[in-house]
Image (tube, rainbow, N blue to C red):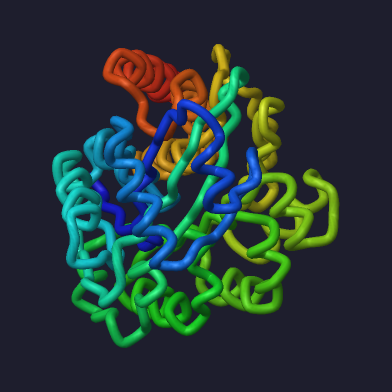
Amino acid sequence: MKSILGIGNALTDILAILPDESLLNEYHLPKGSMQHVDMETGDRIWERLKGLGVKYVPGGSAANTITCTSIFGMPSGYIGKIGNDELGNLFQSTLEQYGVKTTMLRGTKSSGRCMVFIAGANAERTFASYLGAALEMVPEDLDEKFFEGYDYFHIEGYLVQNQDLISKAAHLAKKAGCIISIDMASYNVVESNNAFLHNLVEKYVDIVFANEAEAKAFTKKEPSEALGDIARMCDIAVVKVGKDGSMVKQGDEHYYIPSWPADSIDATGAGDTYAAGFLFAHSQGMPLKVCGEVGSILAAKVVEVVGTKIDVPRWRAAKEEIRALMAKYTVAQ
């Protein structure tokens, strides 16, 4: 089976249910907002949260994708940077429990974390992110041997702000013969790195994953036209349009993929799991339309749970549905 390597910000999600909003007020975190905090503040909040019975979920976009490909059975690897602390050790050990081969670099700062506070009658979420050691990853950390033996290389878009790092990673991956994919990650990241991203995609990237906001930021066009523009820059373009599904294009092939039926409660991680399903199907030699459908099936499972980790019953159902879909294509051939 073909293998995949990912690179991204190694972050642990720390989920905490607050009895009231006093902690949010103390640290000046507006309810429902997303705030970046410094190391001292991040460490202080984490210490406060430990007594609340928090839930730790290793995450980050690329790590979510690579975890899913590993569950599919693809030999999967991950490059990231963590601190020499319990959160970093938790991040690494959890990925390895899922079968991921980790190349975890060690930084001088604390490991990155995204603290998620759930408060109020409507369970509104407030985020405080500290990237920590993840921000210390530099081009000099990368070695060409990290990429040897992998067929795919998946880039987390949030890393693009570290342009020298991504340039070297893409160069080494291409030198190793990898098919390179990138998830655009966030429209504001695309806006602030647009010229660099265009150069990266045109020079190195084979498969682009973007949601409609990211696609518009990248091309200044609406989704269907953006899809065409992106497909002219690389081999395969994927534009996700939320609950309306996705669009995929390769050369003259162009398909609209409806969302797979789901009882959605939390869209967190849907894009990451879609990418995992798409890349797995692509590695199996499936046609473009089937790749999009497999991505849609997997995304439908994660939106039915809180957080980014699909539970065992849904994984079992997803694998059965995907096997049936692929078998139908194989019989048709």
x, y (%) of residue 90?
19, 49
As drawn, is 215 to the left or to the right of 119? right
* Whether residue 278 is situated above or below residue 306 in the rendered picture: below
Q: Residue at x 50, y 29 (%)?
A: 299
x, y (%) of residue 202?
61, 72
Q: Is residue 171 visible?
A: yes
As drawn, is 33 to the left or to the right of 52? right
Q: Quadrant of the C terminus?
A: top left
As drawn, is 7 to the left or to the right of 278? left
Q: Quadrant of the N terminus?
A: top left
Task: Please give the count of numbered marks on the rendered protein.
Answer: 0
* Whether residue 236 is situated above or below residue 125 in the rendered picture: below
Residue nearest the viewer, comparing 88 with 177: 88
Q: Residue at x 35, y 13 (%)?
A: 317
Q: Residue at x 73, y 45 (%)?
A: 212
x, y (%) of residue 302?
45, 26
x, y (%) of residue 251?
65, 52
Q: Is residue 101 visible?
A: no
Residue nearest the viewer, comparing 84 with 16: 16
Q: Residue at x 69, y 61 (%)?
A: 188
Residue nearest the viewer, comparing 305 with 237: 305
